[in-house]
Image (cartoon, helix red, strand yellow):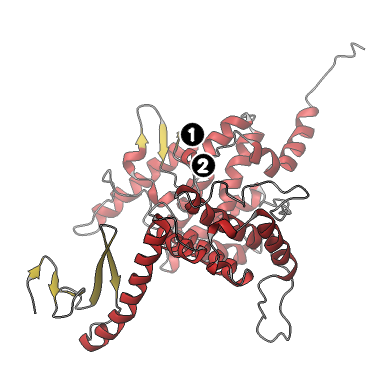
Amino acid sequence: MGKKTTGWERTAVQCLLRNRKSGRYYGRWVISGKQKWVSLDTDVFSVAKLRLTDEASKVGRRRGSRNAVETGAGTVGDLMAVYEERTKANADLRPTSIASRLVALKKVRKTWPGLAALKPSQVTHPAVVAWVSRFKAEGTGYVPPGAKTALQGNSPTSVNRAIDTLRRLMDIALERGAIFTNPVSIKPTEGRLKKKVQRKELILPSTADVQRLFPAMEANGSRGGWGMEAADFCRFMAFTGCRVGEVPRVTWSCLDWDNRVLHIPGFKTDTSDRTIPMFTELEKLLQRLIERRTAAAAYAVGGKPFLAPSDPLFRISECQKTIDRACAELGIQRVTHHDFRHLFATRCIESGVDIPTVAAWLGHADGGALLMKTYSHHRRAHSLVQAAKVNFGGAF
C-alpha cells in the first residue's frame, strides 16, 4: 500500500483508492482539472480492479467527448455524454429531476436512430420537426409486459421532455460555436413542436374533509408512528404553500419573528426562493411546534430539542403513507402533499388576495398566469358567492 491520505488509502493500482472507514474501493480521476470519484461498490480488492477497468473506459470516453465538444469537432453523441455528466453533477437539481432528464435522454437516443453519429450542424430544423412527428405518432416502441404490440404514441409530458432535452443538447453545441442557431428553438411554420398538454380539472378535498384528516393523521401516533409530526408537516404546507421538497430546507433561522415573515429557500426557479408573511395560523403552528420540541427534550434523558438555527423545522421530509392511511380510514378521496399547496393558493384567492401577490407567495415567476389557469374554476365559484353581495339599490 502506498502513501496514506486523510480518510483514504492508496493502492498499488493507479486511480484506485480504499476508504479507511468503510473499506470500500473508489476510482479517482481528473477531468478538465476537476476530480471525478466513482464508487466501485465493493470492498474486495480483486473485484475493485475489474470494475475500475470498466469505469476507466467510461472516463476515457467522457474525456474524449468533452475535448471534442470544446474544440467544436464533436458529434451529437459527444454532446450527449457532456450533457449526461453535467446533469449528474448539477447540485441544483433534485434526484428525481436528474433521473427524469436521463430517461428523456434515453428516449431521444431510441426514437432518433443515428442521431448520436451526426455532427451538430447536421441536426437541421426540418430534421427536428420530422423526428418530433415520428415520436408523437409512433412513441418509443415500448411493448408493455404481456402485450403483443408496442404502444403507439407517447404522453405529452414524455414528448415535451425529450424535445427539451434535444434543445439543451444543441445549446451546448451553440455555446461552443459548433452551430449558430439552435434548430429546436426555431418556431415551426405550421402547428407547434411540443405536444399540447390537456390540463386536468383540479379537484381538492373539502374543508370538512381536511378538518377530519388532521386528527386522523395525529391518531396514527398512538400506534408508534409520527402522526403528530406528519399532521403538522401538512398543516405547514397548507399555511405556507410550500412544495414538499421545500419543507426540509426550511430551518429555524428562516423565521424572522420581529418582522413576522418566513423565508422559504426554494429550488425550482429563481423566484421560488421567497419570503412570505407569518400568517396567524402559521405562527400558532410554529409556537406549538416549539413547545412540543421543548417538552420532548425535557422528557427524554439527554434529549435534544432540535431548535438550533440550522435545524429543520420538521424531522420528516414527507408523510404520504400517513396521509393515505388516514384518507382510507375516513373513506375520503386520496390527498397528496401537493394538494396542500393548492389549498393554500385557493384559500388565499377566495380570501380576496390579488393574483400577483399569491403568485409571489407561491414562488411563481409568471406574475400569476399559471395561477389564473389552474384555479379558474375556484375563482368562478367564488365569484358567484361574491356576486350575491352586490346591490345596485334599484337605481335603474
Does the image show residue 322? no
Residue at 61%, 66% (x, y): give it: 328
Measuring from the top left, give residue 288's x and y in whole percent.
39, 44
Quarter holding the C terminus is top right
Q: Check disc 2 and report the residue beneath it.
A: 239
Measuring from the top left, give residue 4's x and y in whole percent.
8, 70
- Indicate the amino acid at tag 2: Phe
Quarter holding the N terminus is bottom left
Local secondary structure at mark 1: loop
Mark 2: give few (<14), some (14-19) or many (20+) Cα within 10 Å.
Answer: many
Q: Check disc 1 and report the residue beneath it.
A: 279
Instruction: Report the number of discs.
Output: 2
| 335 left or right, relative to 200 | left
Measuring from the top left, give residue 187's x and y in whole percent.
69, 46
- 314 vs 148, nearest the viewer: 148
Does the image show residue 242? yes
Residue at 34%, 45% (x, y): give it: 251
Above-or-below relation of 245 to 80: above
Contact (Cβ within 8 Å) of mark 1 with mark 2 = yes
- 158 vs 307, nearest the viewer: 158
Tell me the quarter of the picture where residue 265 sits.
top left
Residue at 32%, 50% (x, y): give it: 293
| 267 left or right, relative to 354 | left
- 332 vs 14, nearest the viewer: 14
Measuring from the top left, give residue 316's x and y in whole percent.
40, 58
Q: Residue furthest left?
A: 3
- Indicate the amino acid at tag 1: Phe
- 27 vs 320, nearest the viewer: 27
Q: Which mark is first along the chain, 2 or 1?
A: 2
Above-or-below relation of 267 to 9: above
